[in-house]
């Protein structure tokens, strides 16, 4: 399951990143808190495929499918 | 003078703190080639201290060219003996994220033997919600001063200034067990420190989520979005319009006082047309720039701009753009210049570049007089569809949509054919908390942006105005525009526009409209012998009809004006914002060719249908 598959109101733990994700983006995502082992909650999944809102600790980020589908959840 | 660097991630409140500490004594420096600014200013309370506001970055590992420029500048500053102290601003309500960055900065400061102070901002928000943060505990572990502040309310700023004065030039002993370079270790440490010393509870994040559920809701969110964007658009047209009229009136009033004092002749003509006309041509944009910068700043600081970007992202991605491109493009429907400035909010250099490509094609208000004239001349004032709508109104709507479609077409094609050009950033957007913005820094920012336009872009605009005036005035001292050098140039380039049925008069009008598109109407008025062409559009339209201009030529001109980049102010601002003449030159040439080919195609098609 990827982060993009996470339903609104549910949480999961980051497992790994898809190999095609550029290494600089991977480091940046980890710096923002999308770190393997970290629990991420999908707080809002707007309709029509808009970017979803994810909570990492006390910060909320919006990610579109091109990034969220490259983060594998455990 | 000892200098202090302010550094922090976006949305940490760093720039607000800088504004608080320095007041109005600011200077903004640009890095060549990129949109990276470093502001410097003297401290209000300590005249011996100068502060430097570095661009907000999420990390000291850059992933775009602009981030790398900012980070390199930071490391260069660390090696500079004039830098006495670093202040890292973190958002106390989102401590873990701020600490990941602060720990990277701490390691850099230790390596360069510079003292670091951590300013924990937003303490007023914690107070309001009855939440606390253990500043002393964090200070004891990190072994650097940690000062609780509120850049918005001013809480703790005197204490921060005192700590800066006390600690600058004297690096404190550091805690070696906290210095790490490995990202995983830093992440774990930040998590531990935030858990031990940060505020507890989900109160703030839950309140933010409730508002997000409203503003990003399919129905309410959509209605709120349309209402807010309508207000933004109206602000440029309605709120700026009286001030723009005021600016024009002041310039005209000053001209009325000064011109009678000058002897009639070349000097008087120059002062009237080039000096007052030239200054008026660009000063009139200032109210729009001021109002739009203020409104975009209001949206940004309130937290709504990030939500608007989420709403627009999916549809704009189809055209190679991002959700953040929407506000600059919408602004450009009023005027490209504030739109180009608003594109600074697009953080991805590639997406910002694509937004710049679309902006000059948005149907700006300067095109309106040209469209009105050509539509009055060529489209019958009759009703269509059983009297529901007029053909002229439909034509106006059609040409507006045409411009927007052209802009999106260009970004779609360019984004798919130049994938390696300019560094991109993934769509990972921090959702800042909803906040009531502070007016003072917003007004100051709008003032600085307007000043920047007048002092930087104004030089180029004024130079071009003078050149066009000289070409139109000599060699016959302004007796007849048709016989001037500009007129001769129009006649020389007549063969260029002849394929779509235009004679030399239109060549001259198109050449002079490079100054600003609406000049086209005034120039044609002069050439047809009508005083005040802008006010007498109907009379001028009749002259155009009677001149026997083919209908295909009228449509060709409409298409030409909707694409061609004839606006020296847009080119000058693009040069300032992109850092070189390359982009404006490329756009000017390619949109001129595009406009010419589209106009020729339109002429051929319309004439084939009509005949």
Image: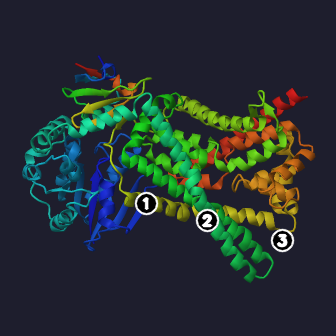
Q: Report the disc number at residue B246.
A: 2
- In the figure, B605 relative to B83: above or below? above
> Where is residue B40 drawn, in percent x and y?
35, 64
Point out the frontmost of discs 3 and 1: 1
Q: Left or right: B1 with respect to B486?
A: left
Q: Report the disc number at residue B477.
A: 3
Q: Residue at x 86, y 59 (%)?
A: B530
In the current view of this chain or complex, which residue is farthest to the top?
A1
In the current view of this chain or complex, which residue is farthest to the front?
B387
Tell which of B356 and B104 is nearer to you.
B356
Label 2–label 3 contact, CB within 8 A: no
Helix, strand or loop at mark 2:
helix
Label 3–label 1 contact, CB within 8 A: no
Q: CA distance from mark 2 to mark 3?
A: 32 Å
Q: Residues within 10 Å of mark 2 (few under 14, many from 20)?
A: some
Q: Left or right: B606 with respect to B466?
A: right
Quarter assignment of residue B411? top right
Q: Are marks 2 and 3 on the same chain?
A: yes
The residue singled out by tag 1 in the image is: B443
Q: CA distance from mark 3 to mark 1?
A: 45 Å
The colour scheme used here is rainbow
Q: Quadrant of the N terminus of chain B?
A: bottom left
Q: Chain of mark 1?
A: B
Work out whether residue B252 can be spotted.
yes
Helix, strand or loop at mark 1:
helix
Helix, strand or loop at mark 3:
loop
Q: If you read the primary sequence from the N terminus, does the residue marked by circle 2 or circle 3 appear first?
A: 2
Work out whether residue A14 can be spotted.
no
Q: Are marks 2 and 1 on the same chain?
A: yes
Point out the frontmost of discs 2 and 3: 2
């Amino acid at each position: 399951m990827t982060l993009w598959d996470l339903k609104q109101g549910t949480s999961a733990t980051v497992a790994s990143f898809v190999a095609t994700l550029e290494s600089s983006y991977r480091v940046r995502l980890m710096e923002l808190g999308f770190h393997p082992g970290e629990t991420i909650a999908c707080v809002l999944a707007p309709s029509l495929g808009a970017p979803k809102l994810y909570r990492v600790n006390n910060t909320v980020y919006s990610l579109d499918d091109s990034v969220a589908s490259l983060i594998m959840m455990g | 003078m000892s200098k202090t660097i302010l550094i922090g991630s976006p949305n940490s409140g760093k720039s607000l703190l800088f504004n608080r500490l320095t007041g109005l004594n600011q200077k903004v420096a640009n890095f060549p080639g990129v949109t990276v600014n470093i502001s410097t200013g003297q401290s209000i309370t300590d005249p011996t201290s100068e502060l430097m506001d570095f661009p907000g970055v999420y990390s000291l590992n850059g992933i775009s060219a602009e981030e790398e420029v900012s980070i390199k500048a930071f490391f260069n500053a660390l090696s500079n003996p004039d830098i006495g102290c670093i202040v890292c601003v973190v958002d106390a309500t989102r401590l873990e994220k701020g600490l990941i960055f602060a720990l990277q900065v701490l390691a850099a400061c230790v390596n360069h033997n510079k003292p670091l102070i951590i300013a924990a901002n937003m303490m007023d928000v914690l107070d309001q919600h009855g939440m606390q943060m253990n500043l002393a505990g964090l200070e004891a572990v990190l072994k650097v001063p940690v000062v609780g502040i509120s850049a918005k309310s001013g809480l703790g700023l005197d204490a921060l200034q005192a700590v800066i004065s006390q600690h600058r030039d004297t690096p404190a002993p550091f805690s070696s067990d906290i210095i790490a370079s490995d990202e995983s270790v830093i992440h774990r440490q930040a998590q531990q420190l935030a858990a031990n010393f940060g505020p507890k509870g989900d109160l703030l994040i839950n309140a933010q989520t409730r508002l997000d559920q409203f503003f990003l809701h399919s129905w309410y969110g959509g209605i709120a979005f349309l209402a807010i964007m309508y207000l933004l658009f109206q602000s440029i047209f309605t709120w700026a319009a009286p001030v723009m009229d005021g600016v024009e009136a002041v310039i005209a009033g000053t001209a009325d006082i000064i011109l009678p004092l000058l002897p009639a002749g070349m000097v008087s003509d120059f002062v009237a047309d080039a000096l007052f006309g030239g200054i008026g041509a660009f000063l009139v944009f200032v109210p729009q720039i001021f109002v739009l910068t203020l409104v975009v700043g209001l949206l940004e600081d309130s937290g709504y701009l990030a939500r608007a970007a989420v709403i627009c992202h999916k549809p704009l991605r189809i055209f190679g753009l991002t959700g953040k491109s929407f506000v600059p493009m919408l602004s450009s429907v009023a005027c490209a210049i504030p739109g180009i400035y608003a594109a600074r909010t697009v953080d991805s250099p590639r997406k910002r570049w694509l937004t710049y490509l679309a902006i000059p094609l948005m149907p700006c208000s300067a095109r309106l007089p040209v469209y009105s004239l050509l539509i009055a001349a060529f489209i019958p004032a009759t009703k269509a569809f059983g009297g529901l709508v007029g053909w002229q109104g439909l034509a106006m709507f059609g040409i507006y949509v045409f411009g927007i479609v052209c802009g999106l077409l260009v970004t779609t094609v360019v984004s798919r054919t130049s994938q390696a050009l300019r560094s991109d950033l993934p769509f990972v957007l921090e959702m800042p908390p909803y906040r009531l913005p502070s007016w003072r820094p917003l007004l100051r920012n709008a003032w600085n942006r307007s000043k920047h336009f007048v002092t930087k872009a104004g030089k180029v605009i004024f130079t071009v105005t003078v050149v066009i005036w000289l070409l139109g005035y000599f060699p016959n001292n302004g007796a007849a525009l048709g016989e001037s050098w500009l007129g001769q140039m129009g006649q020389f380039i007549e063969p260029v526009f002849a394929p779509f049925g235009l004679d030399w008069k239109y060549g001259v009008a198109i050449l002079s409209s490079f100054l600003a598109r609406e000049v086209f109407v005034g120039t044609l008025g002069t050439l047809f012998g009508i005083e005040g062409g802008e006010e007498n559009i109907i009379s001028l339209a009749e002259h155009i009809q009677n001149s026997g201009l083919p209908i295909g030529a009228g449509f060709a001109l409409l298409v030409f004006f909707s694409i061609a980049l004839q606006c020296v102010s847009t080119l000058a601002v693009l040069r300032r914002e992109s850092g070189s003449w390359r982009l404006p030159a490329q756009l000017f040439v390619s949109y001129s060719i595009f406009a010419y080919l589209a106009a020729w195609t339109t002429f051929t098609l319309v004439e084939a249908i009509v005949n």
